[in-house]
Amino acid sequence: MPSFKKARALAALLIVANGVIPALWILLTSMKTETELMRVPITVLPDTPTLANYVRVFVDQPMLTFLWNSLAVATLSTLLCVFVSALAAYAIVRLRVPMGTLILSAIVLVSMFPLISLMVPLFQIMRTVELLNTWPALILPYAVLSMPVCTLVLASFFQDIPQDLERAAEIDGCTRLGAMWHVVVPLAGPGIFTAAILAFVNAWDEFLLALTLSPRVPARTVPVGITLYQGEFAFPWPIISAALIVAIVPVCLLIVIFQERVVGGLTAGGVKG
Amino acid sequence: MARLRVGPLERAERRLGYALLAPALLLLSAVVLYPIATLLWTSTQQLHLAQPWLEGFVGWENYDRAMDDPRFWSALGVTLIYVGVTVPGAILCGLGLALLANLPFRVKWPVRLGLLLPWALPLVFAGLIFRWFFEYEQGVVNAVLRLFGAEPLRWLSTPDLAFISTSTAIVWKSSSFVALVLLAGLQAIPSSLYEAAAVDGASAWQRFRHVTLPMLRPAIVVALIFRTITAIQTFDIPYAMTGGGPGHSTETLAMYVHRTTIDVLDFGYGSALAALMFLLSLALTSLYIRQTRRDEGTG
């Protein structure tokens, strides 16, 4: 059926265009000169493609500092989140803790709490303990923000590991913790990895807390750094576009490489819950 | 209830369980429970960081002030309109994308990436990108308008148009997550149901109406709840696109709370506003959950 094939191709094109065109437009903008951008009517393809805007992103603004802060905060909060969530998920699924499901729903409920209502007291607390404009000010909240989805993903992975394997390990003389380390952790590897990607993307993307708890330039993350970009005159769109591309690329690579895992993890929480 | 005998092995296991749960609960108390308590307590205080000499307990005064504050009501109205427009918008667009993505493609990754990229983009970046699209002189939207001989519009500095452009950005950004959730729901529908419907001579519309939609209902509810919760908190996209303007026409509750606390430093009043926002989101989500429970009971 050629007509069905055509419709199918059209559908694919539509989805890809919807997802990619905004980023593509920014990519084109980032390669135009400021004078070309002033022209009306606007151009689609850059007349004289230039990489000068990318240089200026790193020269005019401390973009490397922003990237380093984002990377550090996202990585550390991901490690903390996955570690804590894995322990909790294992306890709930396997150790028959009384009220386990209740605790799980309490953890999930946290994700329903408006972030802005947390931001206000967190600012006061971080100010009191003098953690404003430091990495921990963001690492701790980010670890908790991703805890619901990570715990759900990990719980569903742990559930699929046959309990007999652990029993066998225990009969062979492993302690409970030993069995967890040698049997469960390797088997749950894909689940742990999925949870880690989700937590990382969440932390890399977060804006509101980063804007309020860590706004000073030396401690700024990428989203805040780009949004508060100070141009000499108006908002410098070619440079902003270049900065956006720089910031988007790492996460895009992550998504491209691990797309199946990400989709699986995103929907495990939603559909099973 | 009679106390069940608990063996020593089981007791040890339970102890281990509590030990493994402890870090999560500790973190949760430090970053969520204690701050909530702080929020509620501060909302009964006069606490202005620029005027520390005026501190003190004022009871419900901050809440009374909110009731008489036209800017609070305006922000509440803007937030509710955002919820009313962008939640159905994202669900409909997401459903459309999911139905398209559910076609039997031979190569699956381009479609999957097309859905994942908007999800992976920070909200505030989506805001910046759409702000660029809606710029007056160089924006691509006005360029298209000019192409068709129409007058370019001041998208970001006219109240209604600012609302339309920010809503467009929000719907674009959030519909891909909705599509991913709905797509998983679509793929879980057994094909035998469609075959049975086809045998009974059901048209494509009838199959959609009587097989797809009812089977997709749980996934739609999940997407609806998630989308509503995030819509109540709308902050990043209007912040990046309009800064709440022109005037306060796109200023949401979250933006007003942010301004009151971080810019004006009035933490007493800001806490009361944040507490009211918490109540609003609690009310809307419990409404949904109750509705779905009722549906499950009768259906």
Image (cartoon, rainbow, N blue to C red):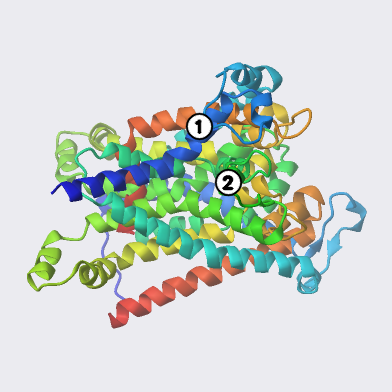
Residue plotted at (36% across, 46% down): A14
Q: Nearer the viewer, residue B204 or B44?
A: B204
Q: Which numbered dot is residue A71?
A: none
Q: Chain of mark 1?
A: A
Left or right: A129 as drawn, with respect to B298 = right
Left or right: A101 as drawn, with respect to B42 = left
* Mark 2 burial class by Cα count in 10 Å: few <14, some 14-19, many 20+: some
**Residue indicated by mark 1:** A248
Left or right: A176 as drawn, with respect to B59 = left
The image position of residue B156, as x and y in percent, is: 68, 51
Secondary structure beneath label 1: helix
Residue A146 to residue B198: above or below: above
Residue plotted at (71% across, 40% down): A129
Residue at the outermost front position: B149
Q: Chain of mark 2?
A: B
What is the number of callouts on the image? 2
Left or right: A25 as drawn, with respect to B192 = right
The image position of residue A268, as x and y in percent, is: 32, 51
- Whether residue B11 can be seen here: no
**Residue indicated by mark 2:** B141
* Mark 1 burial class by Cα count in 10 Å: few <14, some 14-19, many 20+: many
Which quadrant of the structure image shows residue B296?
bottom left
Secondary structure beneath label 2: helix
Residue A244 to residue B78: above or below: above
The residue mark sitting in front, 2 or 1, is 2
Give the spatial CA distance, label 2 vs label 1: 23 Å
Name which residue type carries label 1. Ile
Which quadrant of the structure image shows residue B220?
bottom left
